[in-house]
Amino acid sequence: MRITSSRQRNAVSEGMALGLLMCGRHSLPWNKVGIDLAFEGAWRSWQYRSRFPQVNTDIAHGSDGVWVVTRADERKHTTNFFWDTSGREIAIYARPTWVEEDVDPDEAAGLIDGDVPAEGWRELAADFLRRFER
């Protein structure tokens, strides 16, 4: 089944949140240029990116990495996580699905469009962090 453009964008944002949580990160310092460059570099080498052609198009047409990563804000229809960009840090918050229990990465990944395993999201986030923390 084809995933709509909006759902592709939300999936990548929510998947990045999951991957970062799996890497032990709940927030990122607000560094627009650093996030842009780190995400775009990690995205280009990620093995699952072909599952999200709209995000490829968005980046090719100049969308900033920081907005790709944080698209799933509190107002978006996502199941697991959302981003808050209102402070000095960009923070990840769990939806009610995970408020009462620890996040199960495999279960969370199964609820994100695109059929990417949890380890796939962790790999994207880990590559992003390597680039971001240089």
Image (cartoon, grey):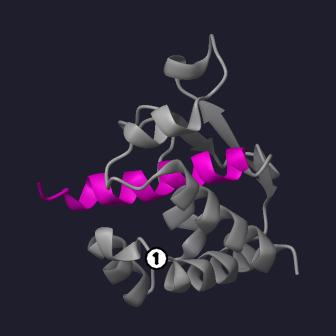
> How far across and how far down the image is residue 86, in percent?
69, 46
Residue 121 forms part of the magenta stretch = no
Q: Nearer the viewer, residue 50 or 17?
A: 50
Quadrant containing the C terminus is: bottom right
Q: Main secondary structure of the magenta part?
A: helix
What residue is drawn where x is 41% and y is 71%? 48
Please state which of residues 107 and 4 is positioned toward the viewer in this rendering.
107
Residue at 57 percent of width and 82 percent of height: 40
Q: Using residue 12 as the reference point, say whether residue 113 is left or right of it.
A: left
- Residue 111: x and y in percent read 38, 37
**The magenta stretch spans residue 16:** yes
Task: State left or right for residue 29 relative to residue 74.
Answer: right
Give the vertical position of 103 relative to 106 (above or below): above
- Residue 65's x, y, as percent? 56, 74
For the image, the number of numbered tags is 1
Which residue lies at the image location 37% right of the left edge and 72% below the top edge? 55
Q: Is residue 48 above or below residue 42?
A: above
Find residue 77 and report its image quarter.
Answer: top left
Q: Residue at x 62, y 16 (%)?
A: 99
| Mark 1 lies on residue | 47
Residue 9, image quadrant: bottom left
Q: Residue furthest top?
A: 100
Residue 46 is left or right of residue 93, and the answer is left
Q: Which residues are magenta?
A: 1-22
Which quadrant of the figure contains the N terminus? bottom left
**Amino acid type, label 1:** Gln
- In the image, residue 57 lies at what x, y percent? 32, 82
| Residue 113 appears anywhere in the view | yes
Which SS class for mark 1? loop
